[in-house]
Amino acid sequence: MASTLFDKIWAAHVVDSMPDGTVMLYIDRHLVHEVTSPQAFDGLRLSGRSVRRVDATVAVADHNVPTENRAAGIAEPESALQVSTLERNVREFGVPYIPVTDWRQGIVHVIGPEQGFSLPGMTIVCGDSHTSTHGALGALAFGIGTSEVEHVLATQTLLQKPAKNMLVRVDGRLPAGCSAKDIILAIIGLIGTAGGTGHVIEYAGEAIRALDMAGRMTVCNMSIEAGARAGLIAPDDETFEYIRNRPHAPKGDALDHAIEYWRTLVSDGGAHYDKIVVLDVGALPPQVTWGTSPETVVPITGRVPDPADIQDDDKRAQAIRMLEYMDLTPGQPLAGTKIDVAFIGSCTNSRIEDLRAAAAVARGRRVASHVRAMIVPGSGLVKLQAEAEGLAKIFTDAGFEWREAGCSMCLGMNPDRLRPGERCASTSNRNFEGRQGPNGRTHLLSPAMAAAAAIRGALVDVREML
Amino acid sequence: MEKFDILEAVAAPLPMANVDTDKIIPARFLKTIRRSGLGAHLFEDLRYQVDGKENPDFILNKPQYRNAKILIAGRNFGCGSSREHAPWALLDFGIKCLIAPSFADIFFNNCFKNGILPVTLTEIECKALMTDAESGSNARIIVDLKAQAISRPDGTVYTFEIDTFRKRCLLGGLDDIGLTLEHGVAITEYEAKSYADPWRPRIELI
C-alpha cells in the first residue's frame, strides 16, 4: 500500500500495539529543557526509576536564561532555581547536558539540528510544542507534556494513536522580500489555528523544495500554530548536505548508509492524505498578524478587518476583544502602525540565515530613535558565526542590541519582556495576550520585516527598502 | 493519579473560542519546580486586574462558580504550548472535567495524564450546556465516564466518545509508565534491532 512519509516513520517505530489501536512508539531523541522537566525527574525519583537511554537524551537550559551578561549568572531566584534543578537532575541521572556557559548552548530547537542530534527518519520529542521544528529534517518531531517527558525518560517510548495525514503543497517561486515566515503565516491564515488539529502536516511543493534548511525549520516550527501535531518535509540533498559534518551526525560509511535509508523517506505516489491544501506563493506579499491569535494574518499591504464583517458569532466576539487588546481600529492599514520594540530571535527565526536577512535590511541604516531593537541569536555558535561574518557589527552600528542566545522575548520567562502597552514587531511564533509580557502587543512577521519596522519605527512593507 | 468515575458538580461557562495555554497559565508562572499550587494563577490575566485585585466580572470569581468542577468552554480550547502547567492549574483550582466542541491535541492529551476528563460534544450540545451553566449553582451537571454520558439538569443525556485505553486509565487511576514497563521485553527487543541503524547514532557529549 502506498504510504506517506509520516506513515513510514511511524511504522518504523512501532514497538507494540494494543487492540484499540494505541501504539507504543519508540522515541529516538529526547530533548530536555529546564521548564517542563523538573516534575518529570521528581516522578522518576519517587518511583525509583532511572533514565532508560541517556545516550538518546540531551538537556539544555534556554527559556529562563538571561540574554546579556552571561557571566553574572541568573539574577531572578525562581529562574536560577529552575536551571540549577536541571543541572542537579542531569548529574543525578547521567543525562548529557550543555551548560549555559558553553558555546553550544542555545534554544533547544536550534541546537538539535545544529549539533546533528536531530536526524531524518527519527522520532524526536521535547516538552515544548515547537519541537515540530525538527520535522524540517524529515523527522517525526512533536511536543509533549511533563507526564510524557517522564514517560519517555523511563521507557524511551510513548503511548500514541496515529495522527491523520495532511498535505500542504506550496507552489510558485517566492518573490523578493518574502521568506519562509511569510509562507507559514499565509498557511496559518488560510487554514486557521485548528486547521491541522489531529493531523501531521507534510509540506511539499516547489516553494518548500526551494527553501534552505533554516527556512524549512521556520515553516515546520509553526505547524503547532495551525494546531497540527507535527510538521515535516521529506529529506533531500539539501538536507543531507546540511547534516554532513554536524558534530553528532553519522560520518563516513555510516553516513552513506544512512543517506541510502533517508532517500526512501518520501511519500509514495498515490499515498492517501486525509486533507490536502494547496496555495501559490508566486505573488505573496510579506505577511503580518494584527490580533492575538496566529491566524489573524493579513498582507502588510492590507488593513485591520472590521468585526462587523465577520459572520461567525464566536469569531466576531474574539475579533472585537483582540482589536481592543491590540489598540487597533477596524479598517486601519497595518503599514504605518507605530512600534516600540523589535525582536529578532526565537526558535522560529534566530538562525544565521535569519540574521543575514535582517542584516541585509539593517546595513547602513539606523534604528528609529523611539524603538528598542534586539537581536537574539538562537545559539552561541550562531552568535559566533554572525560575529565572524560581520553581521553583529552591522546590527550594533545600526543601533540594535546584540545579545546572548536564549528564548528571550518570545515568552515572558526571562528578563526580556514587553512593558504593558508596548507594541512589538516580533519574529517569534505566538501573539497571544501577554505572551511577551503582560499587556504587551505582538505583531508576528519575518526577520527582514522586523528589521525594516525597527528602522522605520512602524510596520512597513520591507519591499520598499530593498 | 486520582480515579475518575462519576462527577456531579457545578459547571462554569467560559464562552470564548481559542483559549490558549498562555491565557490558562501565563509563562511567568512556569518557573515552579512542582506540580501543585498553580490554581492561584489559573487564568491570571483574566481573573485579576492590573492592581492585583480580583476582576469581579470573571466567571470563576463569582460566588456561585468558586467551587465549579466542570468548565464549559469554546472551540479549540487549550491551543498553544505543551505546558502541562495548564491542566495542573485547572486541577489545582478544582476543575476535573472540561466540555468543549474541540480541544488542541497536546492539551487534550495532557488532561488524561492528570485525571482530568476532556469531553468533546457538538456545538449545539455545548451551547445547551453553556446555557445550563449560566444558571450557576442551581444547575448541576452529572458526568458519568463509565456510561460515557453527560446529564443536564433537565434530565437530557448526551453521550460522548473516548478511547478505550484512556477510559481504562482514568477509571482505574492507572499509571501509564507502569503499564508500559510491563512491555519492557518488547522495548528491549526493539532496541536490540535498532542499535545497528546508522541513522540513529548514540549521543556521546564531550
Image (cartoon, coloured by chain):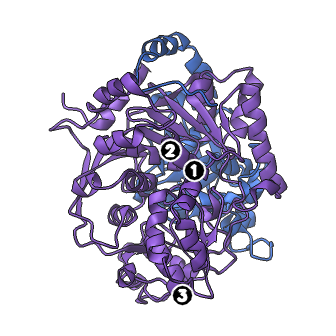
Question: Which chain does purple denote in the image?
Answer: A
- Judge the density around disc 3: few (<14), some (14-19), many (≥20) Cα neighbours within 10 Å: some
Which subunit holds the residue at mark 3?
A
Sequence-first tag of 2 and 3: 2
**Disc 1 marks which residue?**
A381
Sequence-first tag of 2 and 1: 2
- Looking at the picture, tell me which residue is in the foreground, A19 or B67: A19
Q: Quadrant of residue A74?
A: bottom right
**Disc 3 marks which residue?**
A338
In the rendered image, residue A454, in percent from the top left (x then y), is placed at 54, 80
Q: Amino acid at mark 3?
A: Lys
Q: Amino acid at mark 1?
A: Leu
Q: Are marks 2 and 1 in contact (CB under 8 Å)?
A: yes
Tag shown at residue A114: 2
The answer to whether dots 2 and 1 both sit on one chain is yes
From mark 2 to mark 3, how far is it between C-alphas?
Answer: 36 Å
